Image: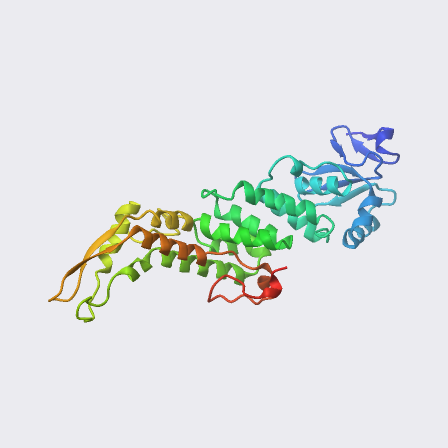
């Protein structure tokens, strides 16, 4: 196909083919930036503007331009996602971004965050990036149908964007709202960007909270005769069966992974609605009727929620996170 000279509005010396579709980011731009490997998109940009915002980006531009044929006005960025690059270029050229009017998908946010990190643009576009991230977290705050990989993308984006509040909220949402094995995250995008120890910690905390809301129902049962103080054996299965019927599951406790999995938040919420449980207790000589009240179950569920808190970003970044123990950070220096 013959090469055509671009009209003057694209600037002199830039050529393209008849079926090209160049998106104009900078009307007075001097270069065409091509993003993507297969479904590439071309953007007309100002190289002067791009060089001003980041040393890393300037070095990348200079390296690419030096490798191009003399006089070429095309810059190839094959490793970058075109959609994410479009938004970044708009922001850098002070053009309106779609993030101002709609909530982005989790995978787009992660691509956006990854690209910002690659070119050392996180600080330059910090406010825009943080607003986009928090918009997503507010939109899906109470959604218990999110896929594990979706929440994992947001956790990774919050980590790359160095957003403490978003990282805390995203890790809490991941633990509470998602079903599935966290090992899947370690093998995907999230595991590539977030330290493995953080994902292991999340898995431990979720299991601890699950244990608190399910197995620990037995802590309300008497282990001594109320009259003679003789040690007695409590019927653990009785209270577990009471809970199983209330949950409508085939087994107790409801699983977090595999077939019939429940989210941690769904288990906690259901535990709060358990009705009173009556049972007989005492030694062979003394028999009494006891009741575990709904308020007891509510308290236990609240304890599980207290356990299932998000992670401190600073602890993760400085490798101070401990796999065992609570998720809550107690270092006041990390509160800024």
- The percent coordinates of residue 328 (x first, y second) are 51, 61
From the top left corner, tell me how far across and down residue 183 is, in percent: 47, 56
In the image, taking residue 132 as reference, residue 66 lies left or right, namely right
Q: How many labels were placed on the picture?
A: 0
Would residue 289 appear left or right of 210 to someone viewing this image?
left
Q: Position of residue 302 (x, y in %)?
A: 40, 54
- The chosen color scheme is rainbow
* Residue 188 appearing in the image: no
Quarter of the image containing the C terminus?
bottom right
Decide: is 50 above or below 320: above
Look at the image and tell me in which quarter the N terminus lies: top right
Find the residue positioned furthest to the left: 285
Q: Residue at x 58, y 62 (%)?
A: 316
**Residue 252 located left or right of residue 33:** left
**Residue 292 visible in the picture:** yes
Looking at this view, is 117 or 177 the one in front? 177
Q: Position of residue 193 (x, y in %)?
A: 60, 56
Asked if 30 appears above or below 200 in the picture, the reply is above
Image point 37% across, 49% down: which residue? 267
Residue situated furthest front in the rendering: 227
Question: Would residue 228 appear left or right of 307 to someone viewing this image?
Answer: left
- For the point 33% across and 52% down, which residue is it? 295
Q: Quadrant of residue 101?
A: top right
């Amino acid at each position: 196909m013959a090469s055509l000279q671009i009209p003057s509005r694209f600037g002199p010396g830039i050529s393209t083919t008849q079926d090209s579709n160049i998106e104009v980011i900078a009307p007075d731009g001097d270069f065409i930036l091509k993003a993507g490997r297969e479904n590439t998109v071309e953007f007309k940009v100002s190289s002067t503007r791009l060089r001003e915002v980041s040393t890393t980006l300037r070095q990348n531009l200079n390296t690419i331009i030096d490798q191009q044929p003399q006089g070429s006005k095309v810059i190839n960025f094959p490793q970058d996602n075109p959609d994410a690059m479009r938004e970044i270029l708009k922001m850098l050229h002070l053009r309106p971004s779609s993030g101002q009017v709609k909530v982005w998908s989790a995978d787009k946010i992660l691509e956006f965050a990854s690209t910002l990190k690659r070119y050392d643009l996180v600080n330059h576009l910090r406010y825009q990036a943080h607003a986009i991230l928090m918009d997503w977290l507010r939109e899906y705050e109470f959604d218990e149908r999110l896929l594990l990989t979706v929440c994992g993308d947001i956790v990774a984006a919050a980590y790359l964007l160095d957003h403490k509040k978003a990282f805390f909220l995203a890790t809490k949402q991941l633990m509470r709202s998602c079903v599935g094995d966290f090992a899947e995250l370690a093998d995907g995008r999230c595991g590539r960007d977030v330290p493995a120890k953080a994902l292991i910690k999340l898995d431990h905390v979720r299991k601890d909270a699950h244990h608190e809301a399910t197995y620990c129902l037995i802590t309300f049962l008497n282990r001594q005769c109320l009259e003679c103080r003789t040690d007695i054996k409590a019927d653990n299965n009785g209270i577990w069966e009471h809970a199983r019927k209330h949950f409508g599951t085939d087994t107790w406790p409801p699983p977090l992974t595999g077939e019939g999995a429940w989210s941690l938040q769904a288990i906690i919420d259901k535990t709060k609605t358990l009705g009173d449980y009556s049972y007989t207790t005492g030694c062979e000589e003394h028999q009494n009727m006891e009741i575990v009240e709904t308020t007891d179950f509510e308290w236990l569920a609240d304890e599980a929620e207290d356990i299932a808190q998000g992670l401190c970003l600073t602890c993760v970044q400085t490798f101070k996170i401990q796999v065992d123990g609570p998720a809550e950070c107690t270092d006041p220096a990390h509160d800024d």
